[in-house]
Image (tube, rainbow, N blue to C red):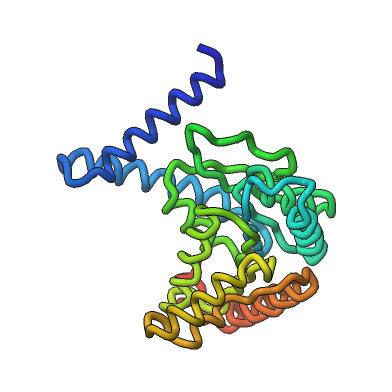
Amino acid sequence: MNVKNQKLSLLQAATDVEKRFLAGPRERSKDLESATRYFLEFIQGFETLGAIDRPCVTVFGSARLGETTPYYALARELGRRLAAEGLGVMTGGGPGIMEAANRGAKEAGGLSIGVNIELPFEQEPNPYLDIFIEFNHFFIRKVMLVKYSSAFVVFPGGFGTLDEAFETVTLMQTDKIEDFPLISMGVAFWQPMADFMRDTLVTQGTIGKRDIHLWSPTDSVDEAVGLILEAVARQRESAARATPDEAQANK
């Protein structure tokens, strides 16, 4: 068995273990084994991402939007601008929009980070990464992305992109995270969703009017970078005002 097939076999085995875990109740010892694996995966993330020496911005978007698309160029420029401001650029580490943001950061001499999820059909990491870490479980990866990011920028994408975006906006809505910009790049792409939230969710009372403003839609890299820099400055001020006990609790 060659190296590629061996890796695919191991990934499939890990996927099968997770399927069995999510299938429903089972022996308590098996659940404890799973909990141990989760704990070790968290430690791996804390050790790798906790060593980063600057605020980071996570960029989400479709792996299918390649170099010939305008969104790729927009993400590349955003990555370049963020790096020029001294911010790290974090993505899922794959192709498409992820590659574009990492590429822009790398070309500007900044820090480019890939935080991947291991899947049997996963593509190779893009070639513009300084730090690359893989996780086996979506929920652990999402914790890491929120914990070690100062803002999220969401480009057009599919189910995975929507999952990350709505998980984040839920944390903001319920005050689990504060002063955390969620910027949606590509106004035309996101407008139908904005209309649905306003005309259906707000109208039927399932969300409040203020909730639709948790997103910041724009087509402007300048506007996106400005919103992020303002938030990072506030986050730094808040950290500077924290008491010693609060600062220790936030580590």
- Residue 83 position, x and y percent, is 78, 60
- Residue 111 position, x and y percent, is 73, 53
Task: Report which quarter residue 186 is drawn in.
Answer: bottom right
| Total count of labels | 0
Left or right? Give the position of 97 relative to 239.
Answer: right
Left or right? Give the position of 99 relative to 194.
Answer: right
Q: Which residue is found at the position 62% from the left and 63% from the top? A: 154
Can residue 111 be seen at all in this image of the molecule?
Answer: no
Task: Report which quarter residue 201 is drawn in.
Answer: bottom left
Could you say which is closer to the camera, residue 251 or residue 6? 6
Q: Which residue is found at the position 38% from the left and 85% from the top? A: 205
- Residue 63 position, x and y percent, is 63, 46
Q: Residue furthest bottom?
A: 209
Could you say which is closer to the camera, residue 153 or residue 161? 161
**Picture layout, residue 53 above or below residue 224:** above
Can residue 220 be seen at all in this image of the molecule?
Answer: yes
- Residue 43 position, x and y percent, is 45, 48
Could you say which is closer to the camera, residue 131 or residue 181? 181
Q: Residue furthest top?
A: 1
Left or right? Give the position of 85 relative to 16.
Answer: right
**Picture layout, residue 191 above or below residue 161:** below
Q: Which residue is found at the position 55% from the left and 77% from the top? A: 195
Q: Which residue is found at the position 55% from the left and 79% from the top? A: 214
